[in-house]
């Protein structure tokens, strides 16, 4: 048998064999292949419930795979050009946390952009690693954070030669890519690992003409959201490794936080989706690229909106752009991105990925059609006609440079008190405040609260952004450290 036959799907094949064996279940889950919960079976389907099973010898065990899951992970590693691949069923959040905790122990430094997803900062709270933040570049016209300039990474490395790792977004939520190959070469010269958050970069491994993937760039580890653009079920993800950190140790770190009851629905979806991408990924993402470009051109013809792309390339903080991303700036029609997001959903029945202060993001995938794209374009045309206004008084930036006072773990677990949001200026935050999505913290534990940040939070609330992170569910109070 060819070792890496990408036509195979070992977990899927084992589940099919298990179903045919008609085994009588006296194990968990208690619904017993759907028989014990007819409403759930009617909703999800009998085929789904019959493979919602427990770990057993014929089906392997996600915590310590030795047979079909191991084979499926080896096929995934081959397909993605990695030495090792790990199936993750706690989302890419778990993959990012496992990646950071594999590379850094308590008190060790990690260099990272501040516009990371909350999962990366959560990893610092869990592990006790200390961040060295690199402020991303800023596009003043769009009001968005960009990538990390190579010279800024180099400065951080020179000032912190004891850092253990550098974390890079590849790409950012908006599609911006840093010069990953150069960062890898620089970090490796200083004996630092390079970790990539590729929550939005699955397609880089299979499409042509797209930014370089982390594994191809020589990064040491990457967290890849298969469910976002790779077609697997929500919450399923991959953690990839190039061998710098031993496979067995990474598995131990994963098992600190990942469930011992791995869902075979999620595991098999990773297996089947990997096969699909390995066999048809080039064709799939060629279609996605063409659809996204068509949408960009049509939206830019409307006027007022700006669907940006590779024309941003060339600044120190923008090495490349993910052309499958349909990121659209809305400031010139006088509407915040979150307002356009709400109108699209409420008035036009169109659900996009997110809206923030100045932009919207629509995810284009193989499941989309030209007709669907035209519906989106038509809706944006109507929104401009009906809702545009003067942009006076609008905030025009998504990123505020933080003042870091304490490491996240020390701040999160420190003695704290709850105060009204408007009375917190000058205090040190001990929790998160963020708009979700995208889940990039406005405030993270250990950062100084400033009037500018409070203005931003109030503005985001007024515009309809969904704020999360604080102990107070209404985001009217915030926990600050007792100093």
Image (cartoon, helix red, strand yellow):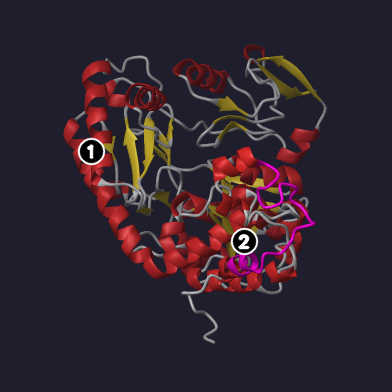
Q: Is residue 302 visible?
A: yes
Q: Is residue 182 visible?
A: no
User: Residue, x 23% and y 36% (percent of image)?
Assistant: 299
Residue at the extreme right of the image, as rendered: 415
Relative to the observer, which residue lies in front, 228 or 471? 228
Q: Mark number for residue 451?
A: none
Specify few, some or many for label 2: CA neighbours under 10 Å numbering under 14, 14-19, or 20 or more: many
Q: Quadrant of residue 443?
A: top right
Which residue is labeled 2 in the image?
Answer: 87
Relative to the observer, which residue lies in front, 86 or 450? 86
Tell how many labels: 2
Q: Secondary structure beneath disc 2?
A: strand
Q: Position of residue 383 (x, y in %)?
A: 27, 23
Q: Mark number for residue 374?
A: 1
User: Residue, x 68% and y 47% (percent of image)?
Assistant: 35
Q: Position of residue 368 (x, y in %)?
A: 32, 47
């Amino acid at each position: 048998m060819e070792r890496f036959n990408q036509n195979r799907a070992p977990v899927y094949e084992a589940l099919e064999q298990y179903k045919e064996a008609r085994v009588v279940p006296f194990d968990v889950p208690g619904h017993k292949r759907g028989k014990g919960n007819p409403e759930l079976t009617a909703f999800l389907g009998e085929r789904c419930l019959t493979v919602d099973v427990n770990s057993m010898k014929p089906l392997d065990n996600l915590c310590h795979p030795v047979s079909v899951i191991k084979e499926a992970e080896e096929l995934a590693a081959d397909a993605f050009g990695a030495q090792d691949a790990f199936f993750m069923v706690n989302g890419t959040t778990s993959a990012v946390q496992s990646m950071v905790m594999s590379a850094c122990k308590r008190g060790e430094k990690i260099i990272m952009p501040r516009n990371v997803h909350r999962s990366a900062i959560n990893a610092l709270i869990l592990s006790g690693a200390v961040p060295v933040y690199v402020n991303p570049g800023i596009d003043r016209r769009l009001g968005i954070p960009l990538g990390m300039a190579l010279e800024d990474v180099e400065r951080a490395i020179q000032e912190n030669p004891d850092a253990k790792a550098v974390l890079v977004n590849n790409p950012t939520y908006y599609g911006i890519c840093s010069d990953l190959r150069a960062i890898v070469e620089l970090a490796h010269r200083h004996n630092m690992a390079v970790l990539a958050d590729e929550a939005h970069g699955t397609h880089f491994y299979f499409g042509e003409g797209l930014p370089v993937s982390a594994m191809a760039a020589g990064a040491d580890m990457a967290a890849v959201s298969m469910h976002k653009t790779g077609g697997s079920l929500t919450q399923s993800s991959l953690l990839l490794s190039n061998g710098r950190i031993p496979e067995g140790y990474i598995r131990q770190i994963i098992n600190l936080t990942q469930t011992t009851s791995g869902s075979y629905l999620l595991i098999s979806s990773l297996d089947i989706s990997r096969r699909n991408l390995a066999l048809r990924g080039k064709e799939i993402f060629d279609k996605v690229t063409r659809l996204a470009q068509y949408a960009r051109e049509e939206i830019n013809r409307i006027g007022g909106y700006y669907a940006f792309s590779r024309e941003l390339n060339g600044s120190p903080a923008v090495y490349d752009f993910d052309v499958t991303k349909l990121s659209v700036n809305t400031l010139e029609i006088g509407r915040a991105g979150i307002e356009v997001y709400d109108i699209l959903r409420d008035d036009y029945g169109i659900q996009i990925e997110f809206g923030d202060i100045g932009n919207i993001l629509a995810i284009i995938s193989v499941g989309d059609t030209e007709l669907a794209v035209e519906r989106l374009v038509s809706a944006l045309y109507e929104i401009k006609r009906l809702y545009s206004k003067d942009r006076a008084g609008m905030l025009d930036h998504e990123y505020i440079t933080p003042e870091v006072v304490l490491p996240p773990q020390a701040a999160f677990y420190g003695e704290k008190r709850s105060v009204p949001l408007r009375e917190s200026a000058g205090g040190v935050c001990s929790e998160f405040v963020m708009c979700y999505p995208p889940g990039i913290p406005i405030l993270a534990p250990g950062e100084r609260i400033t009037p500018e940040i409070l203005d931003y939070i109030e503005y985001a609330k007024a515009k309809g952004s969904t704020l999360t992170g604080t102990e107070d569910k209404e985001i009217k109070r915030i926990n600050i450290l007792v100093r």
